[in-house]
Image (tube, coloured by chain):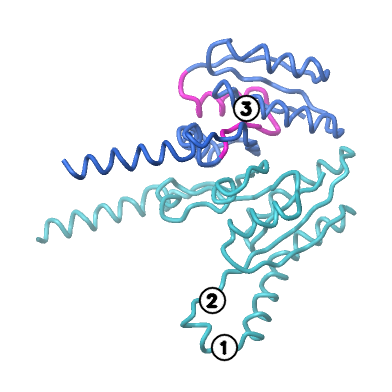
Amino acid sequence: MRILIPDVDSVNSLPAVRYAIREFLNGERFEVHLLYLRSQAALPPARALLERFHVPYQVHRESGNKVHAIRAAARRVRADRIVMGTARRWSATRLSEDAVIHRLLNNAPAPVTLVAGRSVSPVERYGVAAGLGAALGLILLS
Amino acid sequence: MKILVPVDSSAAALAPIAYLESLARSGIALEVLVMNVQPRFHRHIAQFSSRSARDTLRMERSRTAMARAIESLSMKNIPLRAFAELGQPAERIAAVAEREQVDEVMIGVGRHPQWLRWLNPSIAQGVMARTDIPVTVLARGQIGALQRYAVPAGVAGLAVLLMAGE
């Protein structure tokens, strides 16, 4: 069994790796394929985690359109499952990720598991909404 | 591993069952919670029927929707529990997932074009918006040419005709 873990952003890819490790410790046997869509900056933590728990893995790199890259990689490695870490609901990061997630869910060649990541700070939860509301108000007033 | 599988009467909803069977074959201990959510009737319809009649109808529909999933899992000796819930599907699925403290929610969905998703958002996405429990989505089927091109083209054509007529 092969699990593809796309690294879409720096913070939220680690929950997906942790999820895979948890499944591995629960007895599921698979090979992890880490797909990097950005710079190599986030490579060490994810790899360190997998190595610590002796989860077999391979690293792949892609660039360009994220959805196309993930789909292509999933087909190439013949992934049985795609595990994606996402920001928690009601966060600014999640808003930006949603487009990728929605398109992937409709077109993925394998089941897609979404794992929520770090908790959202009050600033991110309410500040973004308040900021957008204020900007909209200003536009309407002008 | 405790997994919640919401099902309706569609074939796509049964996609997680085959996946769970493969997990069980590989030796993973599973506990599956199969659930079906029936919507509330509109009050204008509800006023002409008794509560017991509505409950019986919902129960019958839930039983039919879950029958194939329950049968498949039972045949593979996978432990399961079944729930019938009432209300808004995404909200009830997220609530049951939190209440039962499941490890994962697995949802089978049909593939639909983007314009249809705007009009009718998927339940899977509604669940994801309401809970932080991992959600696995298994998409099945293909988007038909009629859905993808003919309907938007028809709507656009109608709009052009209306504009031309004014």
Amino acid at dot 1: Ser
Q: Which residue is drawn at 59% across and 67% down?
A: B87
Residue A89 placement (x, y as % from top left): 54, 41
Image position of A106 (left or right of A115): left
Whether pointer 3 and pointer 1 mark residues with C-beta atoms closer than 8 Å, the reply is no
Start-end of magenta stretch: A64-88
Badge 1 is on which residue? Answer: B49
Q: Residue at x 63, y 69 (%)?
A: B86
Q: Is mark 2 on a helix, strand or loop?
A: loop
Which chain is displayed in cyan in the rendered image? B
**Do badges 1 and 2 share one subunit?**
yes
Is A85 included in the stretch rendered in magenta? yes
Badge 2 is on which residue? Answer: B41
Q: Mark 1 lies on which chain?
A: B
Q: How crowded is mark 1: few (under 14 residues within 10 Å), some or many (20 or more)?
A: few
Where residue B90 sits, quadrant-wise, is bottom right
Q: What element carries label 1?
A: loop
